[in-house]
Image: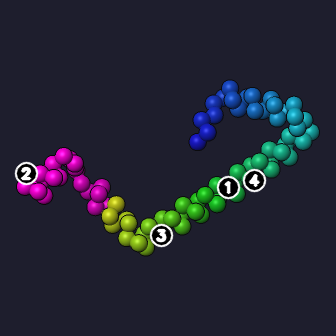
């Protein structure tokens, strides 16, 4: 998602420890984690809503039809339909 590695996470933890302090750090971590959980839940609900809309509009059938195609050559399409 954000492509954070161990060095970046360590830097964030050190800065947080210095800025927030060791006493308030557990509360700050709990607060951040609850916000992350709420954001993930909202994103999951939004995605499921979009999936429901796609299912109701019939886009799943079109998607299955396209997935069933083995190969499509865009250059051959004009030849097949125009008779060139």
Foreground disc of the pair 3, 2:
2
**Mark 2 / mark 1, whichever is N-terminal:** 1
Residue 29 within the segment the image draws in magenta: no
* Occupied quadrant, residue 5: top right
Residue beneath disc 3:
53
| Residue 60 pos. (x, y %) | 37, 65
Residue 39 tag number: 1
Circles 3 and 2: CB atoms closer than 8 Å: no
**Mark 4 / mark 2, whichever is N-terminal:** 4
- 14 versus 52 height, above or below: above
Say which residue appears at 26% left-offset and 56% top-offset.
68
Label 3 vs label 1: CA separation?
21 Å
Residue 84 tag number: 2
| Residue 44 pos. (x, y %) | 59, 59
The secondary element bearing badge 3 is classed as helix
Quadrant where the image shows the N terminus: top right
Foreground disc of the pair 4, 3:
3
**Mark 3 / mark 1, whichever is N-terminal:** 1
Label 4 vs label 3: CA separation?
29 Å
**Mark 1 / mark 4, whichever is N-terminal:** 4
The secondary element bearing badge 1 is classed as helix
Residue 34 tag number: 4
Q: Is residue 49 left or right of residue 61?
A: right
Q: Which residues are magenta?
A: 64-84
The secondary element bearing badge 2 is classed as loop
Residue 71 in view of the camera: no
Label 3 vs label 2: CA separation?
41 Å
């Amino acid at each position: 998602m954000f492509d954070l590695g161990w060095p970046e996470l360590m830097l964030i933890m050190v800065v947080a420890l210095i800025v927030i302090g060791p006493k308030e750090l557990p509360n700050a971590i709990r607060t951040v984690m609850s916000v992350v959980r709420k954001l993930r839940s909202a994103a999951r609900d939004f995605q499921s809503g979009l999936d429901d809309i796609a299912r109701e509009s019939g886009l799943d059938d079109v998607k299955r039809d396209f997935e069933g195609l083995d190969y499509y050559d865009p250059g051959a399409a004009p030849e097949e339909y125009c008779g060139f």
